[in-house]
Image (cartoon, rainbow, N blue to C red):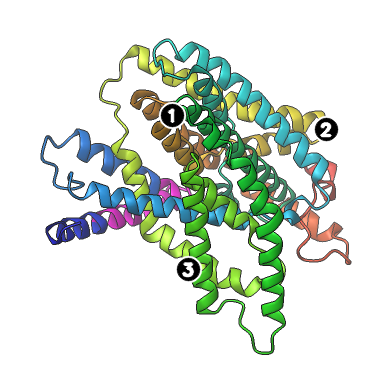
């Protein structure tokens, strides 16, 4: 990057941050999580300045875009690291059967419907690897956005309810399944180009990370915490975490997978026990950098690839099918499986609505699909619209099916029936709610 591009780059970053803050505040006033406005603002900026300002845009010129893409990659890696770091086994405590059953239903049905839709869409959106295309569309329909879901639950005071706890547990399972499926799709897309044996290195890499790196890191964290006056989250440790994140992301990128898998896996293998200080130091720092600059840049880069200028009746029909499959598959799978195992109707509706949230996770999946060649630009644009609609609709629907007074009554019922020996870290359970209130 030359000195002549520094000025335009600073202007780009200021515009991106300002748009993210402005649209985020507007989204909160409309009863939506701020991240909805941030995503919409970035996408609008990117789409408008690429397709609506002629050959010489004022922002996001050809000179600054490579640097912005690099910043966006850093932001996605940091975000995926946070997703991996945020996975907690405690979410499944006492709820394994329920979470596993609903997660299975809310993954299998949308995956199957998405795969069937792929066979239909492939005629108008042909790609080189049809198998990868079918698997990818099924995967994209199965996604639940764990971080955005957590934000929605907090904003609506659902994070302390049983339905909020089980929704987070399901989203955590869905995240692991989705990234595993996406890794398979990326491997298939790479194998078509003769990279099969390179991609096959992903299996031993994952085994080494889980079987070797994770135990080593756990021992180091425990040993450092036991030292008199030793700080688990000292500068040297933070630099080591940053270096480990970079090495893991680079490794998966070199072996033929996307760098986000390495970032996610490194966050997942970091120790939970004996490293509370490390997590307290790392999480706020990375979260602030992501939310303030890095992810808004990613939204703009994602918006640069969105083109809805050629929408016609055929395109509207395809978008309608995509929305029908996305909402019907995810909500239908979650609602049906929840009812089968005995969940009450209202809570099953709430759960199906919550896990239909896709948000930023879906955008990352779609960006990977575009990069590896299993999506064309038109279908990518339609899928981005689907991600925004399914995320925004959650807050609207929940206000009707689970209004604030119902949430308050459920919380009061939990307080009356809570066992005195249950620790604060234990997730709440649906069985604590009386039948008459549901």
Magenta highlight range: 15-37
Residue 206 percent across, percent down from the top left: 63, 47
Would you name the residue on which mark 2 appears? 341
At a point 56% along the width and 22% down the height, the residue shown is 114
- Circle 2 or circle 3, nearest the eye: 3
Would you name the residue on which mark 1 appears? 383
Q: Quadrant of residue 363?
A: top left
Foreground: 328 or 174? 174
Q: Are marks 2 and 3 in contact (CB under 8 Å)?
A: no
Dominant secondary structure, magenta: helix
Q: Is disc 1 placed on a helix, strand or loop?
A: helix
- What's the distance in space between the residues labelled 3 and 1, CA to CA? 31 Å
Dot 3 or dot 1, earlier in sequence: 3
Q: Is 193 above or below relative to 225? A: above
Q: Quadrant of the N terminus?
A: bottom left
Residue 50 percent across, percent down from the top left: 21, 37
Residue 154 as seen in the image, left or right of residue 219: left
Q: Can residue 358 be seen?
A: yes
Based on the picture, tell me whether residue 332 belongs to the magenta stretch: no
Dot 2 or dot 3, earlier in sequence: 3
Foreground: 339 or 437? 339
Would you name the residue on which mark 3 appears? 285
- What's the distance in space between the residues labelled 2 and 3, CA to CA? 41 Å
Residue 326 percent across, percent down from the top left: 54, 26
Residue 174 as seen in the image, left or right of residue 17: right
- What's the distance in space between the residues labelled 2 and 1, CA to CA? 32 Å
Specify few, some or many for label 1: CA neighbours under 10 Å numbering under 14, 14-19, or 20 or more: many
At a point 47% along the width and 56% down the height, the residue shown is 78
Specify few, some or many for label 3: CA neighbours under 10 Å numbering under 14, 14-19, or 20 or more: few
């Amino acid at each position: 990057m030359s000195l002549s591009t520094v000025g335009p780059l600073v202007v780009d970053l200021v515009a991106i941050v300002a748009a993210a803050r402005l649209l985020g505040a507007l989204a909160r006033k409309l009863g939506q999580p701020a991240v909805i406005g941030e995503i919409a603002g970035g996408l609008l900026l990117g789409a408008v300045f690429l397709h609506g300002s002629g050959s010489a845009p004022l922002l996001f010129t050809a000179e600054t875009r490579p640097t912005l893409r690099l910043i966006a990659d850093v932001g996605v890696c940091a975000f995926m690291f946070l997703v991996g770091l945020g996975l907690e086994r405690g979410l499944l405590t006492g709820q394994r059967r329920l979470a596993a059953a609903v997660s299975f239903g809310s993954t299998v049905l949308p995956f199957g419907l998405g795969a069937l839709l792929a066979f239909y869409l492939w005629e108008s959106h042909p790609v080189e690897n049809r198998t990868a295309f079918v698997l990818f569309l099924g995967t994209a329909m199965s996604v639940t956005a764990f971080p955005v879901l957590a934000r929605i639950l907090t904003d609506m005071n659902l994070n302390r309810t049983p339905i909020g706890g089980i929704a987070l547990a399901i989203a955590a399972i869905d995240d692991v399944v989705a990234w595993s499926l996406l890794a398979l799709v990326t491997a298939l897309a790479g194998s078509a180009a003769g990279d099969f044996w390179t991609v096959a290195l992903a299996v031993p890499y994952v085994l080494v990370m889980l079987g070797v790196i994770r135990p080593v890191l756990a021992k180091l964290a425990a040993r450092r915490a036991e030292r008199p006056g030793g700080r688990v989250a000292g500068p040297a440790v933070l630099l080591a975490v940053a270096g480990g994140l970079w090495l893991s992301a680079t490794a998966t990128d070199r072996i033929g997978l996307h760098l986000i898998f390495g970032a996610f896996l490194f966050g997942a293998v970091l120790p939970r026990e004996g490293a509370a200080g490390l997590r307290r130091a790392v999480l706020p720092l990375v979260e602030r950098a992501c939310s303030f600059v890095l992810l808004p840049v990613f939204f703009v880069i994602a918006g640069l690839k969105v083109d809805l200028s050629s929408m016609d009746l055929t395109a509207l029909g395809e978008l309608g099918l995509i929305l029908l499959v996305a909402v019907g598959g995810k909500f239908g799978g979650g609602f049906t499986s929840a009812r089968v195992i005995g969940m009450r109707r209202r809570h099953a509706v709430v759960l199906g609505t919550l896990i239909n949230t896709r948000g930023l996770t879906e955008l990352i999946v779609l960006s990977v699909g575009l990069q590896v060649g299993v999506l064309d630009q038109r279908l990518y644009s339609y899928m981005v619209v689907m991600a925004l609609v399914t995320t925004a609709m959650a807050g609207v629907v929940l206000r009707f099916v689970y209004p604030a007074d119902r949430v308050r009554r459920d919380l009061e019922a939990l307080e009356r029936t809570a066992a005195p020996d249950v620790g604060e870290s234990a997730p709440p359970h649906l069985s604590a709610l009386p039948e008459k209130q549901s």
